[in-house]
Structure formats: structure tokens, C-alpha cells
Image: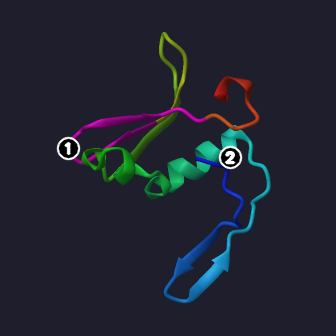
């Protein structure tokens, strides 16, 4: 499959709107956004049995290192989210 060369857009009931780029976020800003907006995570595309997500904590310290984001659902299933920025060498 070739590389996409189209301009991304949002299509909704009010029409088609070009998708604007946002300023570069820090990893902390990304974590804050996801923690405050768990519905923005594409859980239905991964495994919807873990939703809806309820934020529990950020930067949970463990023996293996910190967990960036920890969520649970009403049934008690846990979801761990690791955030990496594209610019971060560990992300590649």
C-alpha cells in the first residue's frame, strides 16, 4: 500500500472540514488530554470489552517503571496506556 497524499478532513452532519494540525504537545500534555478524555482512545477498534474507560491514575510507580495511564471499566478490567511521541526515539 502506498503512502497517503490526501489532506485529512472531518466529515459530519455539518459538512466536510479540513483537519488542522495542532501544536506539538509534550508527552505530559498528551497524557493529561487522554486522562481527561478517555473516549478519545480508539478502544472500539482494539477491544471494546474494556470500555467505557474510567481514569484511575497517571504515572503509577511500579518496580518495572512508571505506568503512564491506568484506566478501569465498570467491571474492573484494567487498561494500561503507554504514551510515546513520534519524535521520541523509543517510539520507533
Where is residue 7? Give x, y as percent: 71, 67
Identity of the residue drawn at 48% across and 16% down = 62
Q: In the rendered structure, find residue 52 and report the number of the disc placed on it.
A: none
Say which residue appears at 32% left-offset and 35% top-offset: 78
Q: Is residue 8 above or below residue 40?
A: below
Chain-order first, disc 2 or disc 1:
2
Taking the view exactly as shown, the residue that stands out farthest to the left is 75
The residue sitting at 54% across, 22% down in the picture is: 66
* Residue at 24% across, 39% down: 76
User: Residue furthest toward the bottom?
Assistant: 14
| Total tally of numbered discs in the picture | 2
Q: Is 75 part of what is drawn in magenta?
A: yes
Residue that sits furthest to the front in the current view: 1
Of residues 6 and 41, the one drawn nearer to the viewer in this rendering? 6
Residue 77: image location, x then y, percent: 26, 37
The boundaries of the magenta stretch are 70-83
Q: How far, Cα to Cα, is label 2 from label 1?
A: 28 Å
SS under mark 1: loop
**Quick check: is 16 in the magenta stretch?**
no
Q: Residue 74's x, y, as percent?
A: 24, 48
Tell which residue pokes out farthest to the right in this image. 23
Residue 37's place in the image compared with 31, above or below, is below
Q: Nearer the viewer, residue 13 or 67?
A: 13
Q: Which mark is residue 29?
A: 2
- Would you identify the image quadrant in which residue 91 lies? top right
| 20 versus 32 height, above or below | below
**Color style of the picture:** rainbow
Q: Which mark, by number, is residue 75?
A: 1
Amino acid at each position: 500500500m502506498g503512502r497517503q497524499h490526501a489532506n485529512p478532513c472531518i466529515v459530519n452532519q455539518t459538512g466536510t472540514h479540513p483537519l488542522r494540525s495542532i501544536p506539538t504537545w509534550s508527552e505530559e500534555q498528551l497524557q493529561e488530554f487522554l486522562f481527561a478524555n478517555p473516549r478519545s482512545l480508539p478502544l472500539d477498534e482494539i477491544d471494546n470489552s474494556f470500555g467505557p474507560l474510567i481514569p484511575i491514575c497517571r504515572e503509577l510507580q511500579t518496580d518495572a517503571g512508571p505506568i503512564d495511564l491506568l484506566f478501569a471499566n465498570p467491571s474492573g478490567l484494567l487498561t494500561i496506556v503507554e504514551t510515546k511521541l513520534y519524535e521520541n526515539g523509543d517510539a520507533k
